[in-house]
Amino acid sequence: MMLAPEIETRPWAEQLAVDDGCCRTQLAYLFERSAFYREKLTAAGFASARDAGGLADVANLPLTEKREIRATCTPDNPFGAHLCVTPSEIVRIYSTSGTTGAPSYIPLTAGDLANWVTASSRSYAASGIAAGQRIVTTYNAGPFVAGAALAAFDRIGLCQIPVGTGNTERLIRAVELLRPEAVVLTPSYAAHLIEWAAERHVDLRGSSVERVLVAAEPGGGEPAFRAKLQEGWGAKVTEAMGIGDVGISLWGECGEQDGMHLGARGFVHPELIDPDTGAALELEDGATGELVLTHLQHRAAPVLRFRTRDHVQVRTSPCKCGRTGPRVRCIGRTDDMLIVRGVNVFPSAVREVVSSFAPRVSGHILVKPQAPGVQQEPPLPVSVELARGATADAALADAIRKRLRGVLVVQTHVELVPWGSLGRSEYKSKLVER
Ligand SMILES: [Zn+2]
């Protein structure tokens, strides 16, 4: 199901040509309206939009870090100096969830909001959900940007059954009685519900749910973790990804399950960088790096070359669904990353390796860094929760340790802990003990 086939199947080179025009217009807009970018670009040697060039030259422009924007917030302008519009043009103000600091505010014009909903609806429609179907939504229509995805479900023509977070009984009852074709939730919550249902002899596999749409944290695209979700739900799992400062569900996976398509094509330009040096990397098949996003037609508080802190792997092979352009799979977030003797380690990747030991393990892990900060000395302590009824076994711990070393090139100390001893989450999992 494609909401805009003429756009979503447009050859990527043609998309880049269209985006080049948008990029030039957007840069002119930033020079005219954004005090933050006028100053930043001028300081970097770009005195005008003409100097800055177009899409092909965008990698020459400076990167933007969230903290730079945050540093420009004042009591008079709580949005930051990248704000480009007058108060009367702002129709919505979201808060970020503040997982990386104090909440910040995301203002949107009516046009910005419409573009967010268009992009999000394309991303979610890629999963195969279609008009007339029912979807149980766990996103709260509250202060956070994920609430805007509810408008995308309306746009697709779905019948929404909002249950919000924090009420598992209500959710399962809605699934049993209202027979939705889809649910949307975090991968952690999807995993938690499998256990919850099993403990109460609820047949999730036999439910009406055919599609489980996951978002908001890495994991939904990792093969072993995904296999566990698909097995437990008896449904197809696809993931979506966005970032508050740029847009909701910018990316969404199709039924081929081979990485997320850019539903926000035309609105956002993606790039890949080396997270350590900031150097631009080619968006070529198999490449990994940090995702950097640039607004192409955003009005309220646009960002240029924004560092998302999402580490992704790129796929460029043609997708059977017909959508064109690079696809990405999220492999982790900078915020969770540890460096163990020079090797980058993502806790979600540790969980993925450990999950391959199912059914002997529950799939829950907790990384316990011994030192504050990112840099760690080996071995890195990892608690691995056993499956229900399983007993600790030195050979299993050793096998997990060896596979972690083989796959992630990291030395760990694996401690097996009993079933139920690590925390469950109805939102995002905490994989690192700080
Ligand atoms: Zn596809």
Image (spheres, rainbow, N blue to C red):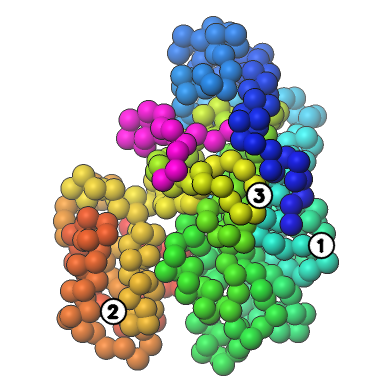
* First of labels 1, 2 by sequence position: 1
Quadrant of image for the N terminus: bottom right
Between 297 and 105, the one nearer to me in the picture? 297
* First of labels 2, 3 by sequence position: 3
Q: Quadrant of residue 189?
A: bottom right
Q: Are marks 1 and 3 in contact (CB under 8 Å)?
A: no
Name the secondary structure under disc 2. Answer: strand
Count up the numbered dots.
3
Pointer 3 residue Cβ closer than 8 Å to ligand 1: yes
Res 102 seen here: no
Amino acid found under the numbered disc labelled 2: Val
What percent of the width, then of the height, locates residue 215? 57, 58
* First of labels 1, 3 by sequence position: 1
**In this picture, which residue range is highlighted in magenta?**
268-286
Amino acid found under the numbered disc labelled 1: Ala
Up/down of 256 relative to 161, above or below? above
Q: Which residue is mark 2?
A: 417
Residue 322, disc: 3
Q: Which residue is mark 1?
A: 131
Q: CA distance from mark 1 to mark 2?
A: 45 Å
Question: Left or right: where does residue 67 sit relative to residue 29?
Answer: left
Res 141 seen here: yes
